[in-house]
Image (cartoon, rainbow, N blue to C red):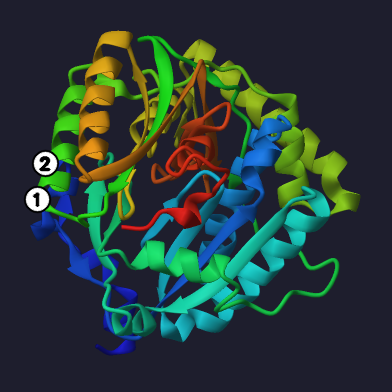
Amino acid sequence: MNETDDLSFFAGVPIFDQFEGVADTANYRPLPDGWILALADIVGSTKAIADGRYKDVNMAGASVISAVLNAVGKGDFPFVFGGDGALVALPASLEMQARDALAAVQRWVAEDLDLELRIAIVPVADIRDAGLDVRVARYSASAFVSYAMFAGGGTSWAEKQMKAGRYGVAPAPAGTRPDLAGLSCRWNPIAARNGEIVSIIAVPGEKGTTPQFRKLVAEIVAISTEQSRSGHPVPAEGPALAFSMKGINREARATAPAKRRLRQRFWILMQIALTVALHRFGVRFGTFDARRYKRDVADNSDFRKFDDGLKMTIDVDEAHLGRIEALLADAQNNGVARYGLHRQTSALMTCFVPTPLSRDHMHFIDGANGGYAVAASQLTGKTVTMGDLTP
């Protein structure tokens, strides 16, 4: 495959628009030979969350996607947000840009958020030499945004290698800042409407990725789709126009150096004020339609995904959750799956919005009080991060 084909690979992966398709192996394509995985996670994320820093943890995880995509000119490359970390798959021709971006975001997370970000670049060739694979599918969350789904065991293997200290990236000099343009954490937590916000992780058990595991995934998804909006935590009309000053301050720190943060904070507040006014009166500002933008926020959100296992943050009532838990418990008892589940009262949204004038802005959903990181810690009954998930 030549460089042009590499750069357009993900755009050529067939799209499916019914989430049940994550269990269909026919939807997945192997990553091209020579590709790499750029990945990161927060060390000690569960403790940070226990200390009330879940918004900082989510911001750090989303910053990995923002930094890498900005460094490579955005493009159309598969990635996944894991709450306390993230992964981006890229052609080898972009490895140096990815290394520099990871090192820069690691330095920024340490200096501005006081968290430790673990980073690595793992060649797909090494994953295949280990007998695993990285296959990717393309799920269309809306007409404007599609998200990558990963299978084959390779991303979990890569995370384990990173946690073991392999495939590391040289640190960036003190004061290095990544390009985090478009990264946003403005929205207030989104309260549950159906019952509770529940973060669920289900990974293959001791028997591996079997037809029974794929059947389990399909059954859980089917139950969640019976709920209002298939359990989507964000209302169809979009989140309420209420914004977090702490989130605004985080965004200002992420997108501007220290000497420009006051001006950046003012600019963000002006954008918010304009959005609220336009939404209230139903008028457009050029091509920007505030009411349509809010609906797009809901449609473009990634509240469910597949990354060597099912990950969902859904809004469900007790009856539906009980049925899901019963399936998960039975699957775990029979060695088909392992799972973690964490209940919360609200969801948290972190966004990557290169420009609000385009409708392809992306919104990453997690539970607002631990979410995926806490669910992951239940897989083995000890404090873990996403890197401990093995197929």
Q: Residue furthest front?
A: 333
In the depicted view, which residue is nearer to us: 356 or 6?
A: 6
The spot of residue 206 in percent (x, y) is 26, 54
Q: What residue is rendered at 80% in x and 51% in y?
A: 112
- Vertical arrangement, residue 94 with respect to residue 305, above or below: below
- Vertical arrangement, residue 130 with respect to residue 213, above or below: below
In the depicted view, which residue is nearer to us: 110 or 323?
A: 323
The residue pinned by badge 2 equals: 215
Label 1: state its secondary structure.
Answer: helix
Numbered tag placed on residue 246 in the rendering? none
In the depicted view, which residue is nearer to us: 84 or 329?
A: 329
Residue 286 showing in the rendered view: no
* Pointers 2 and 1 in contact (C-beta within 8 Å): yes
The spot of residue 267 in percent (x, y) is 74, 37
Q: What residue is rendered at 33% in x and 68% in y?
A: 154
Q: Residues within 10 Å of mark 1 (few under 14, many from 20)?
A: few
Numbered tag placed on residue 211 in the rendering? 1
